[in-house]
Amino acid sequence: MISERMKGLVSNNSVIRQMFEEGKRMAEEFGAENVYDFSLGNPNIPAPAKVRETIIELVNREDPVVLHGYMNNAGFEDVREKVAGSLNRRFGTKFHAGNILMTVGAASGLNCALKAILNPGDEVITFAPFFVEYKNYVANYDGSLIAVEPDTSSFQPDLEKFEKAVTARTHAVIINNPNNPTGVIYTEETIKNIASILERKQKEFGSEIFIIADEPYRELVFTDTEVPYITKYYANTLVCYSFSKTLSLPGERIGYLVVPDECADSKELFSAVTIANRVLGCVNAPSLFQKVVGECIYEKCDVNFYDKNRKKLYEALESYGYECVKPEGAFYLFVKTPTEDDSEFVEEAKKEHILVVPGRSFCCSGYVRIAYCVAYDTIVNSLPGFERLAERYGLKK
């Protein structure tokens, strides 16, 4: 008999993953070329050539006992130094190896951070729409996730609602920037205002409130808008990062967590997240890929591929009469559905062999998320189906 908590998770399995499985079933029935699966944020471009070259070089050069063996739970110190150095060079920070925990992707970093700081009953705030798993991650440590309703005119955080949501029980705020699912970038002004509110609230309640910056899409930016590095604006900030999108390595599960010296009780906190890495069962991040990302720290995938997809899809859907949030980063398009019931639209889209994720999965009904990290031909070939949907709902004039 499984636990009561797992019963709930099983019955509410991720809609994104359900759609992904549905896509595989439909591909077998209709042919993969006739199914347009926009459900999963799975990069469709290969890792930079240097990644493959580095893997081969490391395997041929390094002592295999060391390369594939255990190390400190925080990760290889030389890799952590390289990560710290790259951040210092890019953002003017002053990090060192003792600030960097190598993690099994950004998700593991989030879980390490939450396990380290949450007590039962603590509240964690985030801004809707948000990544579906946040609620489960917080619940893992007996916390409660509080979602601030969005300003759907811009999808920047509604700061008035946010300030009202911060209570004496608030212990963390998760900020995902660039945002999944909207592709919106929270501006420097927005981040400064959030930081100012939290500074006041910490003094009011005599407590510590952490920002957990979830940044797997930091490098995927298509405009001149800068993604603020939040440690520069707020001391109690932890940063979760993943190379899944930057280097097109989602299955390798490699990332890091930053615990700045400026954080309250930073040394104790770093020890806590390091031990959390072990007791959660990760033990340490994958050894080979720690070394790989250390050597490829300044590499990144070709964002022009995603930008081409972004422009084609956005311009086409707008011309059909859909209301879309124009994404500045990540690789998602958040589209207002022509019916209040986004699940109904999802089912109608399936009739056109188009798979999208309902906005209610991100705590924002009335929208769907389209992951455009697919082949360009998939975008082009899906457009007649999107156009027929628009005509069916009376969008296209």
Image (cartoon, grey):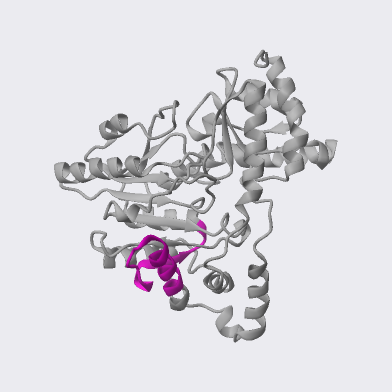
Which quadrant would the C terminus be assigned to in this image?
top right
Between 275 and 31, the one lying in front of the other is 31
Question: What residue sits 59% from the left and 60% below the top?
Answer: 247
Question: What residue sits 68% from the left and 16% below the top?
Answer: 396
On the image, the x and y values in percent for residue 185 come to 45, 42
Relative placement, left or right, of 243 versus 212 is right
Question: What residue sits 41% from the left and 58% below the top?
Answer: 112
Considering only vertical position in the picture, is 249 above or below 314? below
Q: How many numbered discs, if any?
A: 0
Give the main secondary structure, helix, strand or loop, of the magenta stretch: helix
Between 273 and 10, the one lying in front of the other is 273
Relative placement, left or right, of 260 versus 317 is left
Considering only vertical position in the picture, is 27 above or below 64? above
The question of residue 78 being in magenta is answered with no
Question: What residue sits 24% from the left and 40% below the top?
Answer: 197
The question of residue 85 being in magenta is answered with yes
The magenta stretch spans which residues?
80-105
On the image, the x and y values in percent for residue 269 come to 30, 63
Instruction: Classify residue 166 by image quadrant.
Output: top left
On the image, the x and y values in percent for residue 12 come to 55, 36
Between 92 and 74, the one lying in front of the other is 92
Residue 124 in view: no
Relative placement, left or right, of 113 versus 164 is right
Residue 79 in view: yes
On the image, the x and y values in percent for residue 345 come to 64, 23
Extreme residue toward the front, this view: 224
